[in-house]
Amino acid sequence: MQPEVHCARITTDEGKFDICYSAHGVCRLEFPHGGRAANPGVLEPLPAGVRQWHAMATVALRQMVAGVPDPLLPPLDLSSGTSFQQSVWKGLLRIPWGQVRSYAEVAREIGSPRAARAVGMACGANPIPVFVPCHRVVAAGHKLGGFSGGLHWKTRLLASERVLLTV
């Protein structure tokens, strides 16, 4: 039996994001326009317990795309990944607003110094971009690198944090 997931939409100045919640918190966030195909399933009225998380997620997402540092996040459910992916995603949560780390730096910080490429793969598999800030991870030499939501989103999110990089 599949775990129960509830999906909704958050409208920001940058477009409509689709978001899904498990019993443990936000489990998926989809960018508007391009990047991953937004397909949150059936949008339905949210149960009472999830509505509070959705209110928090709405405020936090709007603040993040507008460049407000360190908003209060709802609970995040990172259980969909492997233990390595989860360690990467938790490491990404420790990158401060307005700063970036290279894939190699993240690999060292999580105790896997030879796993820069695997860190990149984990960033690409991040189910909750923006809240789990994979946009703050860049290629060697502080080059932009790739991004699952598209480079225009990575550039936009980093610019909202006042970080400017070369392509």
Image (cartoon, rainbow, N blue to C red):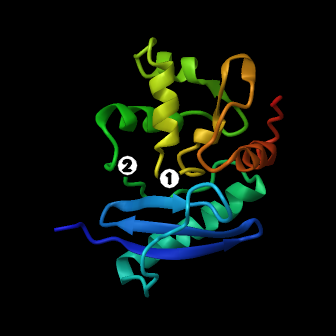
- Extreme left residue here? 1
Residue type for callout 2: Leu
Q: How crowded is mark 2: few (under 14 residues within 10 Å), some or many (20 or more)?
A: many
Residue at 76% over, 48% down = 152
* Residue linked to disc 1: 128
Residue at the far bottom: name it. Answer: 45
Disc 1 is placed on an element classified as loop
Would you name the residue on which mark 2 appears?
Answer: 78
Residue at 38%, 61% in the rendered image:
25
Front residue of this view, candidates 80 and 26: 80
Residue 159 locus on image (x, y percent):
81, 44
Q: What residue sits 46% from the left and 82% below the top?
A: 43
In the image, taking residue 125 as reference, residue 82 lies left or right, namely left
Q: What residue type is labelled 1?
A: Ile
Check contact, mark 1 vs mark 2: CB within 8 A.
yes
Q: Specify which label sits upstream in the sequence, 1 or 2.
A: 2
- Label count reads 2
Camera-side residue: 130 or 53?
130
Q: Nearer the viewer, residue 33 or 50?
A: 33
Q: In which quarter of the image is residue 41?
A: bottom left
**In the displayed structure, would residue 5 be above or below residue 65?**
below
The picture places residue 16, in percent across and down from the top left corner, at 66, 72
Q: Where is residue 144 in the image (x, y as percent from the top left)?
A: 73, 31
Q: Can residue 165 be seen from the camera position used here?
A: yes
